[in-house]
Image (cartoon, rainbow, N blue to C red):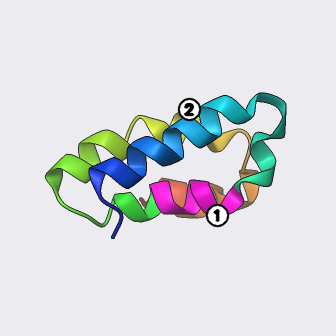
């Protein structure tokens, strides 16, 4: 499970990618995996999921289940 620090770095990667966000599918998957972690990880990952979901429509089912 990703830690709070890892989730913060992943957010930075996605936020800084601007037009090339869709090339970071693995990073978005790490955010989804963060929802399987502890309370702190869930609280951090939860707002990131809808923010970047539009770039990863193929992961919509995973995002909804997260």
Q: Is residue 5 left or right of residue 48?
A: left
Give 53 or 22, whichever is nearer the viewer.
Answer: 22
Residue holding disc 1: 26
Residue at position x 36%, y 63% in the image: 2
Residue at position x 41%, y 59% in the image: 66
Q: How many marks?
A: 2
- Find residue 29 and report its horizontal and vertical position in percent: 56, 62
Q: Is residue 62 left or right of residue 25?
A: left
> Tag 1: Cα neighbours inside 10 Å, few (<14), some, or many (≥20)?
few
- Find residue 15 and report its horizontal and vertical position in percent: 61, 31
Among the 4 quarters of the image, the one containing residue 25: bottom right
Q: Disc 1 versus disc 2: distance between alpha carbons?
A: 16 Å
Give 57 or 19, whichever is nearer the viewer.
Answer: 19
Say which quadrant the N terminus sits in.
Answer: bottom left
Which type of secondary structure does the marked residue at label 1 adopt? helix
**Was residue 47 drawn as part of the magenta stretch in this picture?**
no
Q: Which numbered mark, 1 or 2, is in the foreground of this view?
A: 1
Q: Is residue 53 left or right of residue 41?
A: right
Residue 7, disc: none
Residue holding disc 2: 51
Range covered by the magenta-colored residues: 25-31
> Tag 2: Cα neighbours inside 10 Å, few (<14), some, or many (≥20)?
few
Residue at position x 47%, y 45% in the image: 9
């Amino acid at each position: 499970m990703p830690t709070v620090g890892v989730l913060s770095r992943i957010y930075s990667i996605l936020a800084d990618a601007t037009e090339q966000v869709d090339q970071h599918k693995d990073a978005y998957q790490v955010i989804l995996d963060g929802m399987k972690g502890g309370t702190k990880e869930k609280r951090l990952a939860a707002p990131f999921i809808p923010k970047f979901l539009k770039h990863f429509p193929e992961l919509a089912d995973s995002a909804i289940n997260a």
